Image: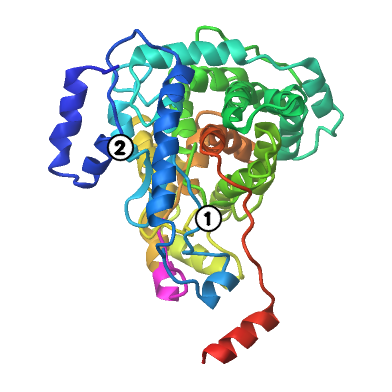
Amino acid sequence: MFRSVSLLSKLRSRLGQQPSLKDSVRWLQIQSSSSDLDLRSQLEELIPEQQERLKKLKAEHGKVQLGNITVDMVLGGMRGMTGLLWQTSLLDPDEGIRFRGLSIPECQKVLPAAKPEGEPLPEGLLWLLLTGKVPSKEQVDALSKELRSRAVVPDFVYKAIDALPVTAHPMTQFATGVMALQVHSEFQKAYEKGIHKSKYWEPTYEDSLNLIARVPLVAAYVYRRIYKDGQVIPLDDSLDYGANFSHMLGFDSPKMLELMRLYVTIHSDHEGGNVSAHTGHLVASALSDPYLSFAAALNGLAGPLHGLANQEVLLWIKSVVDECGENITVDQLKEYVWKTLKGGKVVPGFGHGVLRKTDPRYTCQREFALKHLPDDPLFQLVSKLYEVVPPILTELGKVKNPWPNVDAHSGVLLNHFGLTEARYFTVLFGVSRSIGICSQLIWDRALGLPLERPKSVTMEWLENYCKKAA
């Protein structure tokens, strides 16, 4: 199962320039034969090896300390505390996210695309996250076809959504639809029949791929219900995952299809400590099925300090335009930023809990904009913000990371191609995040990871402990 030699040589040629890629290449088995197109069979081969790897790690190094826990960490949202196993991605404060060892630019180079020099197909990233292998185009096409065959949503799911007021927030309607999908959970059925724990991963896999396949239909239904008078657009059996999602929303321009492929890919996973990923993992650790776990994750994603931030960015940018006009000068923009900050608010889209440099997800979206919409007024405003905001946040002295994150750019791109409804943006994020959360959930079950149960303490306990330690 090895892809073209030319692709492998590309990776090797970069090793001298990027030493960090060396460690990941042993994980990557570049595919070339189209004889095995089945993702599940790939996992069946990998799981025993990784189970033994985990056993060895625990037996040989189980007592190794990973760091010290401080009072600041306990009181500060557990920032900087290492406490989760998350196989599918790793976030470096300086480099940004790596999916199974590959950075976003590397994924753009090696993952199959719908067209030459195009954006990576989300199905390719799903394959990479689950197997650690870069798939061939044939394998991605086979997975895309499989996901389309699984993309069947029962009528009762739509009726559950229709029971809500059309004015309900799109995330409320989306999460309701996901909960309704749970009725057909394969894991729940298998657990009730008494499945052996060594087989938990199998119905989890079925649920996860079904969920990933179905959430674009549910999300598109919510969008069309709220904003397009309920005129639903059916799935197109000739399109890939990202393109189909865009199509069902009502956007068919080739550039928008490419944007959606990029959007879903880069929003899919961001290691395990963020609110939505951690929530999904936590709930799943109780052996809740993928639908229940992902619905919980969506409710975390809907918070203003997490996924809802992407709608806040576009609304804030539009408020700048409304007050100052599209041709705002740098000095006017500085004044508006200071006005926002002095008003006790944050500038949305800047800063990150882990990153200490510009988010690579921002960078690749900026490159997309430079290629496809360089003259867009809102994009030009975003570019000015990139120049203006970081120095001001640095001057404040209270921000560890003054640089833009993924949310600083996505809304402007979507707005350019006609998806202007900012309240809906977090649903797009949610569809994307299904790929990462469900991929890790399959490995949670395959590795037999236990119920998550950290210790909590009171302020009195902390005070007494610190007095004794003084």
Residue 53 picture quarter? top left
Q: What x and y, as percent, mark residue 116?
A: 29, 17
> Along the polypeptide, which appears first: circle 1 or circle 2?
2
Which residue appears at 62% of the width and 21% of the height? 210
Image-based side of 321 in relation to 266, left or right:
right
Check disc 2 and give the amino acid type.
Pro
User: Quadrant of the image for the N terminus?
Assistant: top left
Q: x, y (%) of residue 78?
A: 55, 65
**Comparing labels 1 and 2, the label whose residue is closer to the camera:** 2
| x and y percentages locating residue 233 in the rendered image | 66, 14
Q: Is residue 421 visible?
A: no
> Which residue, as the protein is rendered here, is positioned at the far front?
59
| Residue that carries the numbered disc 2 in the rendered image | 105
Residue pictured at 53% horizontal, 55% vertical: 324
Q: Which mark is residue 324?
A: 1
> In the image, is residue 67 above or below residue 140?
below
Where are the magenta residues, as a range? 392-403
Query: On the rendered structure, is 390 left or right of 449?
Result: left
